Image: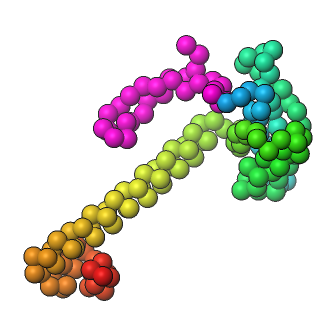
Amino acid sequence: MKGTQIMRKSPDKGESATRVVPKNPFEGWPLDKSYAAKATPKRGSGWDIRILAYDADAEDQARLVGMTDCATLNQLEEKAWDFVRTLTGDQDVYVVSAPDIGDDELMTRVIQAWAAMRDAKNAEAEAARRTREVVKELRDRGLSVTDIAFLTHVSRGRVSQLLI
C-alpha cells in the first residue's frame, strides 16, 4: 500500500486510529484536470509559484507546466487557480496549493497550530452552547440573573442576553 501512515484521534469517539494518507493528493480526482501549486519564498519578498501537473508516465512525479508569483501567501490559492484556468481554458479543474518554507518540521508545527486553533474554536462553540442551555434551565428553576451569572461565570448582562 502506497502512502504514509499517520495516527489521528477519531473525532466522534476520541480513540486513536491509524489511516493511510495517499501519496497522491489527487486520489479520486480526474488526473488530467488536477494541478498542484507549490510556493517557495523569493529572495527579498514574495513567493514563486510552480504549477505542477500529474504525470501519468511517471506515477510519483509531477510535470512543471508553468510559473507565476504572488506577494503574500494569502494570494497563493487565487493566483494558482487563475493561472491554471488561463492555461487550460477550463473552469472545471482541481488545484491543491501549498507553501514550501524549506523546513518540513516547522511546517508540521504550523499545521498542528492550525489544528489546535480549530479545536479551540470548536471547544469555545460547545462551551457557549452548553452555557446557553444551562442558563435557561437555571432560570426555569427560578434562580435570579445574579445567581445564574455567579454560577456560570458570565456577566449579568450576558445572562440577560442569553435569556432572550
Q: Which residue sits at x=37%, y=36%?
A: 10
Q: Quadrant of residue 145?
A: bottom left
Q: Which residue sits at x=14%, y=85%?
A: 144
- Picture quarter with the C terminus: bottom left
Q: Is residue 6 visible?
A: yes
Residue 120 lies, with reference to residue 144, above or below; the image says: above
Most foreground residue, 136 or 5: 136
Image-based side of 59 in relation to 163, left or right: right
Residue 126 at x, y = what percent?
Answer: 34, 59
Q: Is residue 155 visible?
A: no
Q: Is residue 26 magenta?
A: yes
Q: Which residue sits at x=38%, y=36%?
A: 9
**Total residue callouts:** 0
Q: Which residue sits at x=46%, y=25%?
A: 19
Residue 15 at x, y = what percent?
Answer: 32, 33
- Picture quarter with the N terminus: top right
Residue 111 lies, with reference to residue 118, above or below; the image says: above
Residue 51 lies, with reference to residue 44, above or below; the image says: above
Image-based side of 55 in relation to 102, left or right: right
Image-based side of 141 in relation to 146, left or right: left
Residue 137 at x, y = what percent?
Answer: 17, 71
**Magenta-colored span:** 1-28
